Amino acid sequence: MTHQFPSRRAFLAATAATAGAFVLATFVPFPGRALAQGGPPPGPYDPNLFIRIGADNTVTVVVKHLEMGQGVSTGIPTVVAEELDADWADVRFEFSSNDTAHYNNLFFGPAMGTGGSTSINESFDQMRKAGAAARAMLVAATASEWKVPAGEITVASGVVAHPGSGHKARFGELAAAAMQLPVPTEVTLKPVSSFKLIGTRLPRLDSVGKTTGRAQFALDIRRPGMLTAVVRRPDHFGAAVATLDDAAARKVAGVVDVIRIPSGVAVLATDTWAATRGREALKIEWDLSKAERRSTAEILAEYGRLADQPGMSAIKRGDAAAGLGRAVKTIDAEFAFPYLAHAPMEPMNCVLEVKGGKAEMWAGSQLQTLDTFVLAKILGLKPENVAVHTTLGGGSFGRRANPQGDWASEAAAIVKAIGGKAPVHLVWTREDDIKGGFYRPLSFHRVKAGIDAQGRITGWRHTVVSKSILIGTPFEKMGIKDGVDSASVEGIVDTSYAIGDMSVELHNPASPVPVLWWRSVGHSHTGHVMETALDELAHLAGKDPLDFRLALLAAKPREQAVLKLAADKSGWGSPMPKGRGRGIAYHESFGTRVAMVAEVAAGDTDFKVERIVAAVDCGIAVNPDVIAAQLEGAVGFALSAVLRNKVTLKNGVVEQGNFDDYEPTRIGEMPRVEVHIVPSAEHPSGVGEPGVPPLAPAIGNALFAATGKRVRSLPMELGRTA
């Protein structure tokens, strides 16, 4: 028997609406702006929620965010351990349950989730208070037991002591009594000058497990009687199953069942090999009536035509047209950006088990609350009867934070169809995700900007054409205003530069090709356009690109400091040999300021990026080593998009499929990366994404310095110049 479900469109609309009713109320798509307005709201800091101290003195910190390589499983315990005065050697971490009431992301309102580079940003004060409260409770319990004044007790490196009497005790001896005490209604936090752990290069807590193989990802989960499922999805986005012949698939040894679900046809088997072989044996005819059938060139041509027409106003400041009329020199530039896959090392997968009216999912879940509600809706359960066990995630770059809960919904549809008779491990192959997942939107920009005789910007007119990420998702209500998707124009409308006469217009073209936030979201293309265009204006004005930017940031000392640090450490202004060039770029995203200087060596048709000097101001540097790693990782991640990565369609079908034709940055291509952190006592902001936007324009500007050729679009090809 072949089970059937309603259409994918109706199915996802229903699940998204359910999730949206819960999530939308206070979702903030721009945490950086919220930070500027005072940061996240306060959250609960009861140590019993976030800290468990064992009799063996181990301090386990409960982490409410997904660890996907960004270092949050070290950063949050560092913040707790600092205020607790714990011994770092005793600190451990574990992931929280999907208890939204206690473990919500304070920026996301009543929802758990990891994204927008918010993890340390939103939880910094909350986790400090949890650590300080636990410390106060340990001191109070100790004072009571030893009959000494609390003010005479010291705490350091996991030891509570009373110097006057010589009493000493480890945390494990006192924790049981301490955690029975009332949680202080107010706590005193350390001054920044007293930090001992924050600001130091502590070893990551997840490194040993990942190195030895003991760390557990969703792909490692095994449940008794578990079946493996793979799904045959259409090659064309928007297509649907017309006819299905699964007879040959059912004859494959190990295949247990074949099920039609909204996204395609699922094959269940006793192992992954049997499931994939069964999938290959399926005979399916697809209904292409609503499918995307165009090739990339045709879509881009449409985008170009749209850019010729008036769009929706994203911002109108001053009079850009009049300013351009006053200009003595102008640039008129076009930029094209391809679809990009996320391509995390661990493809999408999860394990779902339903029994006794309850469901459990094991996954590298990035939006636990949304996944909870998607599962509950499909399975007909109450959300409180759905447990999401967060595992480590083998990379994400935005892919695991899917507002449609795509892989969770597929798993739920499969388990429901078989009546919950077995746990199901849904596995996407890498080809599944690159050929049929979600993408950074294909985008097109047109910029016309001018300068006066003194080299000052007189007007800036900017048009963006990019499919909306947020329309049709649970986040549409908060992220779309007057038709404008904030994720398409971020980094332009809120630019740090003082550009007085400016207009930005947006087109949201429709297409069945699914799009999603990709590391740094809209900043991944808007940052490149802004910094390339500014560089062009600087050269048009005959000014040093650094000086040109500093003048536009005259009222912003933090921004200037980042630029100056990168320039100073790179040797900006010193001569370069022929065929080599140096380029600079600056961009703020997610509340973090990053400047980069790139050095390149260029020939007639190819080039090599040899050095990247990065400066970052992310407020208080919780762990400088993790910050440096994130900037270095961002360089490696974004460099592949500079050099070659693109997802292209041929007659609607994705042409790439794995790392052979969607190739990541190779170690031999990786430039020398130097990261310099601006000392700061400001509230910390995120570092997971802000290293991506400045890389491409810094390289492009360096190529111009080396060759005199301006390469605007990505990936960069010296043969395709402005």
Image: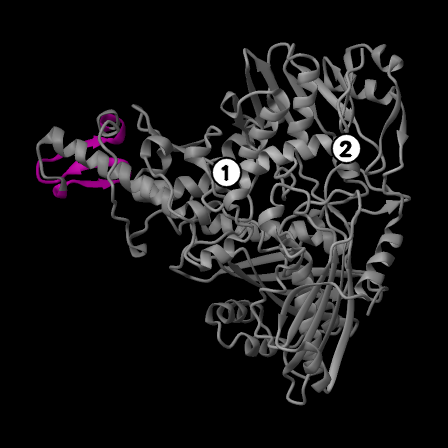
For the N terminus, the image quarter is top right
> In the rendered image, is residue 150 in sight?
yes
- Occupied quadrant, residue 472: top right
Residue 565: where, in percent of width, then height?
51, 68
Label 1 environment density (alpha carbons within 10 Å; few <14, some 14–19, many ≥20): many
Q: In this view, does 368 lie above or below 529?
A: above
Is-magenta flag for residue 584? no
Residue at x-position 71% and y-position 16%:
417
Give percent across and percent down for residue 597.
62, 66
On the rendered structure, is 239 left or right of 38? right
Identify the residue at image location x=79%, y=67%: 334
Q: Judge from the rendering whether residue 51 lies leftward or rightward of residue 385; answer left or right.
A: left
Residue designated by label 1: 111
Range shown magenta: 151-174
Taking the image as drawn, is residue 711 in sight? no
Secondary structure found at label 1: loop
Front label number (1 vs 2): 1
Give the class, few, some or many, for how many residues have Cα within 10 Å of label 2's Cα (few <14, many ≥20): some
Residue kind at label 1, given as amino acid type: Ala
Residue ID at (62%, 59%): 490
Q: Residue 432 carries which label?
A: 2
Tell me if label 1 and label 2 are in contact, CB under 8 Å: no
Residue 337 vertical position relative to residue 543 in the rendered view, above or below: above
Query: In the rendered structure, which disc, 1 or 2, sits on the residue that comes first in sequence?
Result: 1
Q: Quick one: quadrant of the C terminus? A: bottom right
Check disc 2 and report its element: helix, strand or loop. Answer: helix
Foreground pick, 206 / 715: 715
Q: Which amino acid, by three-letter code, is at mark 2?
A: Asp
Could you tell me residue 202's position as x and y percent?
42, 44
Q: Where is residue 631 in the image (x, y as percent from the top left)?
A: 57, 53
Whether residue 159 is in magenta: the answer is yes
